[in-house]
């Protein structure tokens, strides 16, 4: 499944999140040096991803 994720996090945090969900980056948006959101593709169960999102202080953007 694809997830458009947003939150306020350093680049290394985004990298750690991507690795933890076994994700592949599909798309992203930046504003200068700030990552606004990233769209990931992952085969992990949503309940697992939801718990990882919470751990990183991220959220799924429902308005894809």
Image (tube, rainbow, N blue to C red):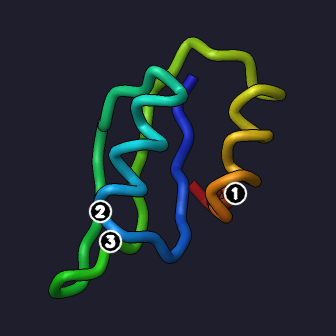
Tag 2 residue: 11
User: In 3D space, how far apart are the residues under numbered discs 2 and 1 (Cα atoms)?
Assistant: 22 Å
Report if the CB atoms under discs 3 and 1 are less than 8 Å apart.
no
21 relative to 33 in the view: left or right: right
- Kindly report the distance in space between the C-alpha atoms of the residues bearing marks 3 and 1: 18 Å
Q: Residues at badges 2 and 3 in contact (C-beta under 8 Å)?
A: yes
Is disc 3 placed on a helix, strand or loop? Answer: strand
Task: In the displayed orientation, state which residue is furthest to the left.
Answer: 32
Badge 3 local density, few (<14 within 10 Å), some, or many (20+)? some
In percent of the image, x 57 and y 22: which residue is there?
Answer: 1
Instruction: Say above or below: 9 vs 61.
Output: below
- 45 to the left or right of 34: right
Image quadrant where residue 47 sits: top right
Give the secondary structure at mark 2: helix
* Label 1 crowd bin: few (<14), some (14–19), many (20+), radius 10 Å: few
Q: Which mark is residue 35?
A: 3
Q: Nearer the viewer, mark 2 or mark 1?
A: 2
The residue positioned 39% from the left and 53% from the top of the image is 14
Q: Position of residue 33 (x, y in %)?
A: 18, 82
Q: Position of residue 7 (x, y in %)?
A: 55, 70
């Amino acid at each position: 499944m694809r997830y458009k994720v947003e939150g306020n996090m350093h680049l290394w945090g985004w990298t750690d999140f991507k690795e933890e969900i076994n994700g592949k980056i599909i798309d992203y948006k930046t504003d200068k040096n700030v990552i606004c959101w990233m769209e990931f593709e992952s085969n992990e169960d949503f309940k697992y991803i939801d718990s990882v999102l919470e751990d990183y202080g991220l959220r799924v953007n429902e308005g894809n």
